[in-house]
C-alpha cells in the first residue's frame, strides 16, 4: 500500500520521464534511418524538376504494365515503360502550364466523340454517335467506382494526347524551310564539281608506329567532357555451375526405362499405359519418316507392328517406342471449309444463333454445295465465321496430316478428293470439301514412352558442394586462378548499368545487379547466387560512378581518334613543300585520281569513300586551283578543281521546301522530348526498389 501511495505522489514526474524516453526513442530512430528525409526517400521513387513521383503510384502502374506486357516480359521492361510515361508527363506538363495550353470542355467533348464514334455502345439506331448515350453510360458507371475511375483515366489520356499534339504542332510550325533554305537545298543537290585528287590513306601508316599516351587521352576527355559523360556501371566476372544430369544419371535412367520394356510390349491399352508412364502424352497420329527422331528414323519406320525399340536417347529424354501400325497417307492435303458458329463459341463474334440453329444452317449449306459446288465460295463469304479465309472461298490451301484439329483431320484423311460433309469441332460446324491429296506414302503410328533426363539428388548435392568449395576458395585467392585450377570457365561482364536486368550467359537476374551496386559491396567481393538452371559465383571486378568517363573506359573510343589525328600530321609533313598533284603522287607512291559530278548533298568520292569535308573545301575553290592538304575521314587529300557546274536556275523551290519541312517536322516529336529530358533535373531512385 505504501508503494502505491509513493507512485501516486510521483505520477507527474514518472509521466515526464516516460514521455522523454519515448521522445528520445523516436528521435534516435529518425537519425538512424536518415530522419524525415529518409521517409521521403522511401515513399518517392524519383524527383523530376522538383516534382516527386510517388513510389506507391509508380508501383501500381508497373503492375498494370506488367500484366499488359505478358508473362515473357521482365519487370524492368515494365519499370522503364512507366518511367518514360511519367517523365514525359512531367516535362510536358511544365511546358503546357508555362504556355497556358489547355483543353476546354467543348474540345473534350469533341475528342470523346471522335474517339468513341465507332463504338456501338455510344451509337443510336442509325449507327451515329449519340452524346446522350455517352452521358447515360457515365451516369451508370458512377455507381461502380472502379469502372468510373477507368472512364476518368480514359478522358485524361485523351486530354493529355490533345495537349501534347497542340504543343508539338506549335513547334512544327516554326521548323519549316524558308525560300532561301529551299534554294540552298536545291543547290547542294544540283551544283556539280569535277576534281582531280591525291589521297594519302591513313592505312598507309601502321597503327603500331603511332603512340598515344593515357595523358593525351585524358586531355582529350577534358576538352570534350560533355561527349564522354557516363552513367554508373559495374564490371563482374562469374563462373556458372549448371545443374545438369551426370552420365551416371543418364545410365541409371536407361536401366529404369529398360525394365518396363517387356511390360510396355504386352500392354493391351497402349494409350493408357503411355499416359501413365511417360512425361510426353500419347500421340494417336500416323507420321511420316521425316517426322521421326533422325537418329532412329530408319529403325522406327521399319519396326514390325507390336515390337518395341529402345531405350534410346532423343534430346533431353530416354525413350522406348512401340510400333502400332502403318497405312498409306497423302503428305499434303488441300481443303476448303465454311465455318458455322453459334453463341458461346470463341468464333461466334456477333452471332446469336443456338447450336441447333447452327446445325440446320450447316446442313442447308451442305445440301446447296453438293447440288452446285460453284456456290461454295459465295456461301463461304456470306456464312463462314473464319475471317482468315472466307474471302478466299474458304480455301485453306495445302496442309500436312495432323495439322488440323482431330475431327477435321480425321475427315480429310479418311475420305477421298471431292467428298463433302459437316464436321463438328470446338470451333463450330465445318462444311468441308476435300480438294486434293498428294504423294500417298507409308505412314506409321508409334507409341513412345519418354522419361526426362534430370539430375539426381546426388548430382545436385555434388554441384552445390563444388559451387560452395569454389566460392570459399576465391575469398582468399585469385578468382581466375582458382577457376583455372578446377577447369571452370570465367565469364566477364563489363559496364553493367544500374537498371540492367540481363546478365549475359545467365539471363534476367536483378539480384546480381543490385548486389553489385550495393554500397557495401567492394571490388573483389564474391557471392554465390541461385540462378535459372544452377548457381553463379560472382566477383565484382570494377566500379565506375556517374560522371565523366575514366581513361580506361574511354580509351577504346578516343585512341583511334588520336591515332588518326597523329597520322594526319605525319602525312601532311611527308608532303610539306611538294607542289602539284603529280609530284605529290610520285613522292608518296600514289596515283592522281578523278571524280566527276560531285555534290554536297551526297559527298561521296569515287575510290575514296564519303568525304564531306573534302568535297566542301573543293566547292570553295575556284576552277584550276589546288587545295592545301585536307584531313578527311579516310586520309589526307590534296584536291584540284577541274570544272564547276552551277545548277540551272528554276522559278521555285517548292519541292525542296516541302521535303525539308517534312524531314524537320518528322523529327520534332523525339527531339523535343529528348531536349526537355536533357534540360531537366532528375533524381532517379528506381534502382533502389527494382
Image (cartoon, rainbow, N blue to C red):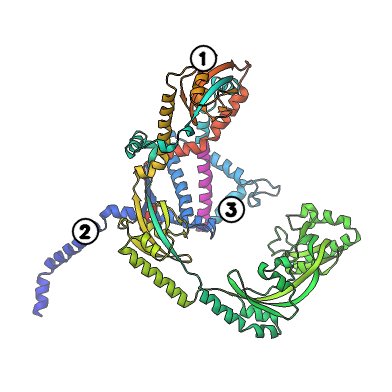
Q: Nearer the viewer, residue 367 or 344?
A: 367
Of callouts 2 and 1, which one flags the residue occurring earlier in the amino acid sequence?
Answer: 2
Q: Secondary structure at mark 1?
A: loop
Q: Could you say whether the residue bearing mark 2 is in a helix, strand or loop?
A: helix
User: Which x, y percent locates residue 568?
Assistant: 43, 29
Q: Nearer the viewer, mark 3 or mark 2?
A: 2
**Where residue 27 is drawn, which disc sits there?**
2
Q: Which residues are magenta?
A: 146-166
Residue 163 on the magenta segment:
yes
| Above or below, comparing residue 353 to residue 46 in the picture | below
* Residue at screen point 48% across, 36% down: 671
Category of crowding for the residue at label 3, using alpha-carbon neighbours closer than 10 angstroms: few (below 14), some (14–19), many (at least 20): some
Which one is earlier in the sequence, the residue at label 1 or at label 3?
A: 3
Image-quadrant location for residue 664:
top right
Q: CA distance from mark 2 to mark 1?
A: 82 Å
Q: Is residue 515 above or below residue 176?
A: below
Which residue matches tag 1? 625
Quarter of the picture containing the N terminus is bottom left
What secondary structure do most residues of the magenta stretch adopt?
Answer: helix
Look at the numbered disc 3 and give the secondary structure of its residue: helix
Marking on residue 137: 3
Q: Quadrant of residue 535?
A: bottom left
Q: Is residue 566 left or right of residue 16?
A: right
Whether 448 is drawn above or below 397: the answer is: below
Amino acid at each position: 500500500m505504501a508503494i502505491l501511495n509513493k507512485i501516486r505522489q510521483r505520477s507527474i514526474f514518472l509521466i515526464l520521464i516516460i514521455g522523454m524516453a519515448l521522445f528520445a526513442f523516436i528521435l534516435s530512430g529518425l537519425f538512424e534511418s536518415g530522419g524525415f528525409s529518409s521517409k521521403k526517400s522511401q515513399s518517392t521513387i524519383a524527383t523530376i524538376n522538383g516534382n516527386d513521383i510517388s513510389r506507391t503510384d509508380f508501383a501500381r502502374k508497373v503492375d498494370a504494365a506488367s500484366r499488359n506486357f505478358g508473362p515473357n516480359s521482365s519487370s524492368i521492361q515494365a519499370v522503364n515503360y512507366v518511367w518514360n510515361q511519367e517523365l514525359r508527363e512531367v516535362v510536358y506538363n511544365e511546358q503546357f502550364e508555362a504556355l497556358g495550353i489547355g483543353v476546354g470542355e467543348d474540345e473534350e467533348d469533341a475528342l470523346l466523340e471522335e474517339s468513341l464514334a465507332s463504338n456501338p455502345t455510344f451509337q443510336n439506331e442509325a449507327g451515329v454517335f449519340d452524346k446522350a448515350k455517352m452521358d447515360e453510360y457515365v451516369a451508370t458507371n458512377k455507381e461502380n467506382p472502379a469502372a468510373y475511375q477507368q472512364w476518368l483515366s480514359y478522358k485524361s489520356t485523351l486530354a493529355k494526347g490533345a495537349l501534347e499534339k497542340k504543343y508539338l504542332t506549335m513547334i512544327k510550325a516554326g521548323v519549316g524551310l524558308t525560300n532561301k533554305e529551299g534554294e540552298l537545298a536545291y543547290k547542294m543537290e544540283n551544283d556539280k564539281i569535277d576534281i582531280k585528287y591525291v589521297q594519302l590513306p591513313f592505312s598507309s601508316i601502321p597503327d603500331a608506329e603511332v603512340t598515344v599516351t593515357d595523358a593525351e587521352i585524358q586531355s582529350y576527355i577534358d576538352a570534350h567532357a560533355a561527349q564522354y559523360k557516363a552513367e554508373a556501371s559495374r564490371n563482374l566476372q562469374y563462373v556458372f555451375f549448371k545443374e545438369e544430369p551426370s552420365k551416371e544419371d543418364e545410365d541409371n535412367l536407361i536401366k529404369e526405362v529398360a525394365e518396363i520394356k517387356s511390360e510396355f510390349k504386352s500392354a493391351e491399352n497402349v494409350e493408357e499405359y503411355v499416359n501413365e508412364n511417360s512425361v510426353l502424352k500419347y500421340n494417336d497420329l500416323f507420321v511420316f519418316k521425316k517426322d521421326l527422331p533422325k537418329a532412329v528414323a530408319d529403325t522406327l519406320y521399319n519396326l514390325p507392328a507390336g515390337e518395341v525399340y529402345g531405350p534410346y536417347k532423343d534430346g533431353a529424354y530416354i525413350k522406348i517406342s512401340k510400333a502400332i501400325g502403318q497405312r498409306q497417307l497423302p503428305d499434303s492435303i488441300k481443303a476448303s471449309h465454311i465455318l458455322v458458329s453459334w453463341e458461346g463459341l470463341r468464333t461466334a463474334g456477333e452471332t446469336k444463333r443456338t447450336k441447333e440453329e447452327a446445325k440446320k444452317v450447316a446442313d442447308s449449306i451442305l445440301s446447296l454445295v453438293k447440288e452446285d459446288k460453284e456456290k461454295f465460295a459465295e456461301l463461304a463469304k456470306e456464312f463462314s465465321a473464319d475471317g482468315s479465309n472466307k474471302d478466299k472461298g474458304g480455301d485453306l490451301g495445302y496442309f500436312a496430316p495432323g495439322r488440323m484439329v482431330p475431327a477435321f483431320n480425321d475427315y480429310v484423311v479418311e475420305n477421298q478428293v471431292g467428298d463433302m460433309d459437316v464436321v463438328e469441332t470446338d470451333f463450330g460446324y465445318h462444311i468441308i470439301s476435300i480438294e486434293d491429296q498428294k504423294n500417298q506414302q507409308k505412314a506409321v503410328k508409334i507409341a513412345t514412352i519418354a522419361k526426362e533426363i534430370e539430375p539426381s539428388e546426388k548430382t545436385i548435392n555434388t554441384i552445390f558442394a563444388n559451387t560452395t568449395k569454389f566460392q570459399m576458395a576465391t575469398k582468399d585467392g585469385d578468382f581466375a586462378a582458382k577457376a583455372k585450377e578446377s577447369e571452370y570457365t570465367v565469364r566477364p561482364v563489363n559496364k553493367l548499368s544500374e537498371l540492367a536486368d540481363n546478365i549475359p550467359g545467365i539471363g534476367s537476374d536483378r539480384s546480381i545487379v543490385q548486389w553489385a551496386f550495393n554500397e557495401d559491396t567492394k571490388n573483389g567481393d564474391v557471392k554465390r547466387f541461385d540462378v535459372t538452371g544452377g548457381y553463379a559465383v560472382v566477383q565484382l571486378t570494377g566500379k565506375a560512378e556517374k560522371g565523366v568517363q575514366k581513361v580506361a573506359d574511354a580509351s577504346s573510343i578516343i585512341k583511334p581518334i588520336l591515332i588518326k589525328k597523329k597520322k594526319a600530321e605525319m602525312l601532311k609533313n611527308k608532303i610539306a613543300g611538294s607542289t602539284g598533284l603529280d609530284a605529290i603522287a610520285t613522292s608518296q607512291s600514289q596515283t592522281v585520281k578523278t571524280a566527276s559530278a560531285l555534290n554536297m548533298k551526297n559527298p561521296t568520292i569515287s575510290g575514296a569513300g564519303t568525304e564531306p569535308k573534302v568535297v566542301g573545301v573543293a566547292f570553295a575553290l575556284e576552277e584550276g586551283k589546288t587545295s592545301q592538304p585536307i584531313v578527311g575521314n579516310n586520309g589526307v587529300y590534296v584536291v584540284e578543281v577541274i570544272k564547276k557546274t552551277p545548277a540551272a536556275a528554276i522559278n521555285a523551290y517548292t519541292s525542296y521546301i516541302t521535303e525539308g519541312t517534312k524531314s524537320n517536322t518528322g523529327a520534332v516529336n523525339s527531339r523535343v522530348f529528348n531536349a526537355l529530358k536533357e534540360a531537366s533535373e532528375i533524381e532517379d531512385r528506381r534502382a533502389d526498389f527494382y
